[in-house]
Image: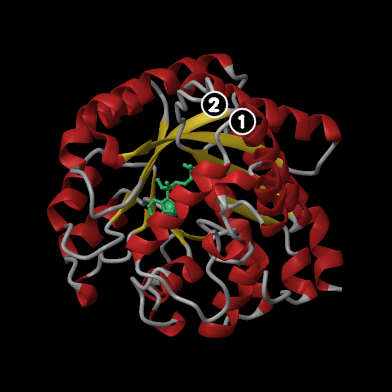
Amino acid sequence: MENEADVFYRQLPKVELHAHLNGSVSSHTIEKLIDRKPHLNIEHNMTAIGKGQRRTLDECFQVFKVIHQLVDTEEDILMVATDVIREFAADSVKYLELRSTPREEKHTGLTKRRYIETVIRAIQLCKEEGLDIDVRFLVAIDRRNGPQVAMETVELAEEFLLSSNGLVVGLDLSGDPTVGDGKSLLPALERAKNCGLKLSLHLSEVPSQLEESDLLLNLPPDRIGHGTFLHPEVGGSQILVDKVLKNNIPLELCLTSNIKGQTVPCYSKHHFKYWYQLGHPSVICTDDKGVFSTDLSQEYQLAASTFGLSREAVWKLSQQAIDCIFAPEAVKQQLKQKWTDLQPQVFQ
Ligand SMILES: CNc1ncnc2c1ncn2[C@@H]1O[C@H](COP(=O)(O)O)[C@@H](O)[C@H]1O
Ligand SMILES: [Zn+2]
């Protein structure tokens, strides 16, 4: 990581709701993976986008392919997931929803079921370590793989919703937004919703997806990832905005991700401003802290410095994120108590 956030932001208790497992792998963990697989000839600069660097969104998706080569066994997934959870905990993240796309790797014998089980095991191991972080899992659908794979993923997620003791709470729709068709995935998403999986959908991450976004908003999802091009100023529409407002669907906003992936021209033009001014629930998240060389403290600090937020406003922002989590009401109450208990020392 390139910058250290100030101590206030480090100590601020935080909720992270939008973190892709393989995009969150730190450079330290990447080193360990490269050591395990020297034959791949992967160099470090192929897995992260450093300070001041930008890539097209398309190039970002090439980076994920490289990381997927490095993470293709149960041992890799276990290491990556435990490292990522420990890193979020060290950044004062008290509640984390990790998301990841279950992958089958024929050459290593990895199956999608074992993939999910391994992430769950990592969450349990971290709990046993006594880390002060509550971690839940969202099973992800990569939109490029089409409706049939999406439906199989939903069926698998349904099983784990019932058997994981509350660790699997929902479903994510992600993947390269320029590939695949959201409409064809509606039956899978409807099924997921009907069986009690919470839905977080990447929506309008790129321009010209009005029709798809409109269809997906009719579900409606429980949270929206990015929503960069929903509002009329950037080519979206008031109809889309009204649907989001009417259903009070929280947005997961990832500033550095959008700047480095070049869907937003600069921090001050980030759509955080639009939604925050409306008083709409907006949750600051990292997206891919490894790939974009950031962490959640930095993202809060960037939001504060760009939009002139006071410490009190930043506190409120992190506290209000609690209302947007997918875990049950009792967990929200515990987290709110934790925030109250920590407030004096964070503001001292
Ligand atoms: C930058 N904006 C983004 N937009 C859409 N999908 C993204 C993403 N960043 C990450 N992913 C999704 O997460 C996967 C990597 O983590 P997992 O292997 O699932 O843990 C990527 O392959 C992509 O499907
Ligand atoms: Zn994302």
Can you give x and y, in whole percent of width and height, for residue 40 in the image? 56, 47
Residue 115's tag is: 2
Q: In this view, does 178 lie to the left or right of 54?
A: left
Residue 19 visible: no
| Mark 1 Cα shell of 10 Å, populated few (<14), some (14-19), many (≥20) | many
Q: Do the residues labelled 1 and 2 touch (CB within 8 Å)?
A: yes
Distance CA(mark 1)–CA(mark 2): 6 Å
Instruction: Give the vertical position of 162 relative to 285 (above or below).
Output: above
Q: Which residue appears at 46% of the width and 80% of the height?
A: 267
Can you give x and y, in whole percent of width and height, for residue 248 in the image? 36, 52
Can you give x and y, in whole percent of width and height, for residue 1 in the image? 67, 69
The image quadrant that residue 229 belongs to is bottom left
Residue 192 visible: yes
Q: Which residue appears at 82% of the width and 54% of the height?
A: 341
Residue 157's tag is: none
Q: Which residue appears at 73% of the width and 74% of the height?
A: 4
| Mark 2 Cα shell of 10 Å, populated few (<14), some (14-19), many (≥20) | many
> What's the amino acid at mark 2?
Tyr
Instruction: Report which residue position mark 1 lands on.
Output: 119
Tell me how the rendering is colored.
secondary structure
